[in-house]
Image: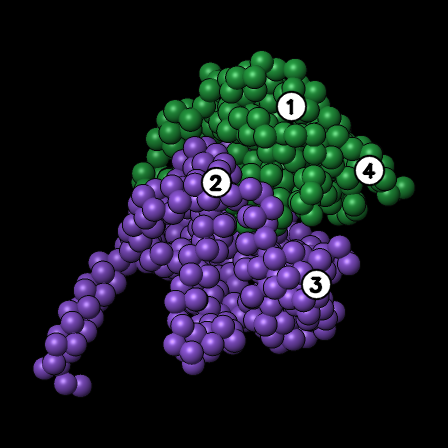
Amino acid sequence: MNFDGKYGRVLLAAGSLAAAVLISGCASKPDPNDEAAVEAYNEANDPLEPMNRYFFEINHLLDETILKPFAGYYHTALPQFAQDGIRNALRNLHSPTILANDMFQGSLGRAGDTAGRFLINSTIGIGGLIDVADSFGMKYHDEDFGQTLGVYKVGEGPYLMLPVLGPSNPRDVTGRIVDYALDPLTWVGYIYNVGWINTVRGGLEGLDTRARNMQAIEELQKGSVDFYATIRSLYRQHRNDAIRNGEDPDEVIGSITNEDNIPADGTAAATVVLQPTAKVPGTDPAPTAPGQVSEAN
Amino acid sequence: MQNRRAFLAAATAFAVATTGVPAMASVDLSSFVNEVADASITQLSSADPTDPARAAALKPILLKYFDMPGLAKHVLGAYWKKINPDQQQEFVATFTNYIASVYGQRFKQYKGQKLEVKRVRDEGATATVFTAVANGDDAGSRVDWQLRTDGPAPLVTDIRVEGLSLADTHRQEFTSVLAQHGGDVTALMGILKSKSLLN
């Protein structure tokens, strides 16, 4: 590659910066003899934690200075029906990608709902502003290619905090790229040279979501002792739930009732604590049996 | 983002009355969940509308209906075994105060939501009660109650709202703090106490 040009130098500089961030961004692995620290490290599945935390801080700053104030205006200035109309229209625009992913997952019933919603809401619903199909029993559901990969047992990979875009992982990044290519609006943007419509849409989506969750996020942040870890955990659980379409897994949830749960002194009765969700296969690191902990590291 | 809203609804999950139609074989577990919800609403709505009063009103409900020692053990992960029984006792107490403080505040948003039991799954020593909490115009939230049923009375071991587990989320959060503090549970308790409105 020729790095003589202006762009070449910029590219090189950007590349070195990214490499520097990556190298310094790797979390130092815990002492293999410290069983508790190893377990915490494995459960977190976040080898890039320092880098992720860095972007989390930047995103937080962007949120405080830009997104949150705008969302505040949006929330107070626009009447509820207008906010609902905007959300309905944004959801309607996603219908083609949702439909494609319904079909990829073989969910024909849900694909029918999505197609029906798109036809009804785009016409009777005035370009998607009114969710008419909902009252016909065709409820909105979300679907994306990250979930499709999850359905096909593709593991999530390590946690990632993306600049601006927020929490993710390699599987969901891949999903985003595929969804972007699947979305007719992407091509409308390219072909008619109106790429800004996708930027506006993305911005509006961020604004709408932020505005709707103003109080929830504030409460969550207030009660949390490590907001970064809270978001990491919630993101994963939410994605696993979305992959299952909210269905409870059929298998009875395994409880950890072994000696692990008996206190060190062995006097207290063993307490059954449920592992609350049966994990989606392939999305979690293999459980580490006691005794294999140091090997797993 | 939806996940955050759903997580918040964990608070309102406590706070619900019901006309649920329980399954015949599991009437007791279904009515147990209703009892927890009713008790929470009654106690929290009669409390002074201040955060400390709400926390104080929620605490006895946690102690009566929730497996607080089990939850405390779960949220510490492998760090639980590294502390002695006295510290374990202290952690259970600190954790209970923290939970009462954080979730008590969220009852501010209770607006008369109703809880409906959808299904009860008996799992032997444990059980799951699947409920839906209606949020007015919204579709409503799925709230699953994990219970242990091996004692004289059922106890709540976890609440999942839209698939988000209260126990797992706090576990991730606490073990992350502990990893940053070299496994010092006393440091974690200090942080929890600073968020707590109870002594």
Q: Tags 2 and 3 in contact by the CB under 8 Å rule?
A: no
Amino acid type, residue under disc 3 in the picture: Ile
Q: Can you say whether B139 is above or below B186 in the image?
A: below
Chain for numbered disc 2: A
Among the chains pictured, the one given green colouring is: B
User: Are dots 1 and 4 on a single chain?
Assistant: yes
Q: CA distance from mark 3 to mark 1?
A: 50 Å
Amino acid type, residue under disc 2 in the picture: Ala
Q: Which numbered disc covers residue A124?
A: 3
Q: Which numbered disc covers residue B20?
A: 4
Q: Few, some or many C-alpha atoms within 10 Å of disc 3 (few <14, some 14-19, many ≥20)? A: some
User: Are dots 2 and 3 on a single chain?
Assistant: yes
Name which quarter of the figure residue A4 lies in.
bottom left
Q: Which residue is disc 2 drawn over?
A: A77
- The location of residue A84, given as percent across then percent down, is 59, 49
Q: Can you say whether B71 is above or below B197 in the image?
A: below
Chain for numbered disc 4: B
| In this rendering, position of residue A138 left or right of residue A25 | right
Give SS at disc 4: loop
Chain A in the picture: what colour? purple
Name which quarter of the figure residue A113 lies in.
bottom right
Q: Residue furthest right?
A: B24
Q: Which residue is disc 1 drawn over?
A: B61
